[in-house]
Image: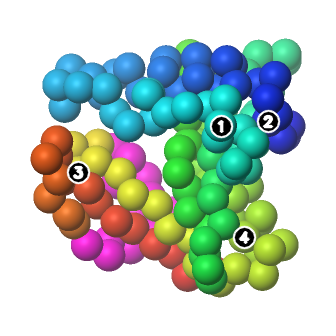
Amino acid sequence: MHRAGPGDAAAVRALTRAAYAKWVPLIGREPKPMGADYEEAVVRDRIDLLYVDGALVALIQLIEEPGCLLVENVAVSPAFQGRGYGQRMMAHAETIAGVLGLAKMRLYTNQAFAENIALYLNLGYRLDGEEVLANGVRVDMSKAL
């Protein structure tokens, strides 16, 4: 695992755009992470990168909040999806939360991303609520550690 720095912003953007591209036809727009400012995010947030045999396979973007750790973005390269790397990144985030002394994980996703919601439920997250937004329904989820 490698912590991203300013020199990694382009790679973070490229991986995120590739990972989220499959959702564009489903929701009719680019998901929020595809348009994020990663030059700023790599400085402001914690973004950890997973390389396998020299290839960037997955990343997770984390934001420390009072009492919890927010998963802002988890992305897996399309060529490596379905191999457990997303779960590995989520477990990594929980380890970080523990080191930071945080007792809760939090995330949000689009209601249309049913396979992601199923994964998070399988990992022990619970549904906390939904919020109707101008461009879809956001699902809020959390997990006590």
Report if residue 34 lies within the magenta region: no
Q: To which quarter of the image does residue 94 belong?
A: bottom right
Identify the element where label 2 is drawn: loop
Residue at 16%, 42% (x, y): give it.
Answer: 135
Identify the element where label 3 is drawn: loop
Asked whether, in this view, residue 42 is left or right of residue 21, the answer is: right
The answer to which of marks 3 and 4 sits earlier in the sequence is: 4
**Would you name the residue on which mark 2 appears?**
4
**Would you name the residue on which mark 3 appears?**
111
**Would you name the residue on which mark 4 appears?**
97
Tags 2 and 4 touching, CB below 8 Å: no
Q: Position of residue 1 (x, y in %)?
A: 84, 40
Tags 3 and 1 touching, CB below 8 Å: no
Q: Which mark is residue 28?
A: none
Q: CA distance from mark 3 to mark 1?
A: 27 Å
The answer to which of marks 4 and 1 sits earlier in the sequence is: 1
Q: CA distance from mark 4 to mark 1?
A: 22 Å
Q: Position of residue 76 (x, y in %)?
A: 57, 31
